Image (spheres, helix red, strand yellow):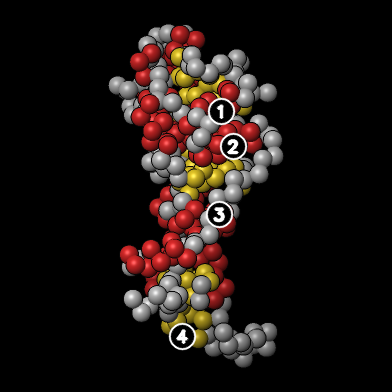
């Protein structure tokens, strides 16, 4: 049974595209046939995060408008077996596609792939409605910040209203040191506030910037902590029980001293 | 330098408290219809006993002692004669 998963957040810049790319790569590395779909029409970015920007010929809108066949628009990732990208159009806007067309597109993709991961644009307008239509499962990405959590709550409500019974949460960019000194909301704090199921926690990792610079999602590198977290999330998506990464960090006497000397 | 050992307010707790209030307001403003319906029913119940100034009614959500509270401000024009002496109306002070 193939499934379509939409990656949402409400707020921009919390890591939806990075999450989409990494989960796509991780699922494909696990042997699944995967398509990552960029639903952010007019502001495409999944292609650069994946490092496939130079190979785009056709895009999602071309497929929907019938200028090309679906298979022609799919870009095969040569580094990972079974991984494809369906890029967004860059010159059109979000109204170029409607939810029914998206649904049809996702259904067509399901015929030959195990997972369809849809990168939803920020916001709650047409782009959001397009991206969620056709998805079987919804994932909400947030960071431990007030604004991102608030938007995650709003998106949870909208997803539930669209028929997603159990949206799942990924908490991105946790900084264990800040959590240890009480300056960042911890996982239980956020779960308590949002009251939804946790799918995974991704630590803040400088390597994400490096990986985006190169166009190689972090899961391709063995040493990245964020990459490890995404690999675990991919396994959970496939139904495995995987314990959450231990990100706890005790505040040592030295780090406390350093902090006090800085006066914060 | 002398406040080295003083307990600092954790900013994450500030964040949590602020989020709780803001989410409560967000969630309620979304279900505007339900709020109106509830308001109507409350008004109906109260107007059985007292004459109230309908346009002056205000319903709002507040956080009191870290708990959500529905605060209703209902201006009373007059108490209906006989309402207070009715045995079935129990008088409680809230």
| Label 1 Cα crowd, 10 Å radius (few <14 / some 14-19 / many 20+) | many
Most extreme residue toward the front, as rendered? Answer: A254
List the residue tagged with mark 2: A233
Cα–Cα gap, marks 2 and 4: 63 Å
Could you tell which of marks 3 and 2 lies nearer the N-terminus?
A: 2
Cα–Cα gap, marks 1 and 3: 24 Å
The residue mark sitting in front, 4 or 1, is 1
Q: Position of residue A232 (x, y in %)?
A: 60, 37
Q: Are marks 2 and 1 on the same chain?
A: yes
Residue at (50% x, 66% y) in the render: B39
Q: Are marks 4 and 3 on the same chain?
A: no
Q: Is residue B56 above or below residue A90?
A: below
Could you tell which of marks 2 and 1 lies nearer the N-terminus?
A: 1
- The mark found on residue A69 in the picture is none
List the residue tagged with mark 4: B78
Residues at circles 2 and 1 in contact by the CB criterion of under 8 Å = yes
Q: Is residue A61 above or below residue B38?
A: above
| Res. A152 in view | no
Q: Position of residue A148 (x, y in %)?
A: 43, 49
Location of residue A38 (image quadrant): top left
Q: Are marks 3 and 2 on the same chain?
A: yes
List the residue tagged with mark 3: A248
A200 lies left or right of A94: right
Chain to which mark 2 belongs: A
Residues at circles 4 and 3 in contact by the CB criterion of under 8 Å = no
Residues at circles 3 and 2 in contact by the CB criterion of under 8 Å = no
């Amino acid at each position: 049974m193939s499934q379509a998963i939409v990656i949402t957040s409400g707020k921009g810049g919390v890591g939806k595209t990075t999450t989409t790319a990494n989960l796509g790569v991780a699922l494909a590395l696990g042997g699944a046939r995967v398509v990552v779909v960029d639903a952010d029409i007019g502001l495409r970015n999944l292609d650069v995060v994946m490092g496939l920007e130079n190979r785009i010929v056709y895009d999602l809108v071309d497929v929907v408008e019938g200028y090309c066949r679906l298979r022609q628009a799919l870009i095969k990732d040569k580094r990972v077996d079974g991984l494809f990208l369906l890029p967004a159009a860059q010159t059109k806007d979000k109204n170029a596609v409607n939810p029914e067309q998206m649904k049809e597109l996702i259904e067509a993709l399901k015929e030959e792939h195990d997972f369809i991961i849809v990168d939803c644009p920020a916001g709650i307008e047409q782009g959001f409605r397009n991206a969620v239509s056709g998805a079987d499962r919804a994932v909400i990405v947030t960071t431990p910040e007030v604004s991102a959590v608030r938007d995650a709550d709003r998106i949870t409500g909208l997803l539930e209203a669209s028929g997603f019974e159990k949206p799942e949460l990924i908490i991105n960019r946790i900084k264990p040191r800040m959590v240890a000194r009480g300056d960042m909301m911890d996982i239980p704090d956020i779960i308590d506030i949002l009251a939804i199921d946790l799918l995974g926690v991704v630590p803040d990792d400088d390597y994400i910037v490096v990986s985006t610079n190169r166009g190689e999602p972090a899961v391709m590198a063995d040493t990245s902590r964020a990459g490890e977290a995404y690999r675990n999330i991919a396994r959970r998506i496939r139904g495995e029980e995987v314990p959450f990464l231990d990100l706890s960090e005790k505040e040592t006497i030295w780090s406390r001293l350093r902090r006090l000397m800085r006066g914060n | 330098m002398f406040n080295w050992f003083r307990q600092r307010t954790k900013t994450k707790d500030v964040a949590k408290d602020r989020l709780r209030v803001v989410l409560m307001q967000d969630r309620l403003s979304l279900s505007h219809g339900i709020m109106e319906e509830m308001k109507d029913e409350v008004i109906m119940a109260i107007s059985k006993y007292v004459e109230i100034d309908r346009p002056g009614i205000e319903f709002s959500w507040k956080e009191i002692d870290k708990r959500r509270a529905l605060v209703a401000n209902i201006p009373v024009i007059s108490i209906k004669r006989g309402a207070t002496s009715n045995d079935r109306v129990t008088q409680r002070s809230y």
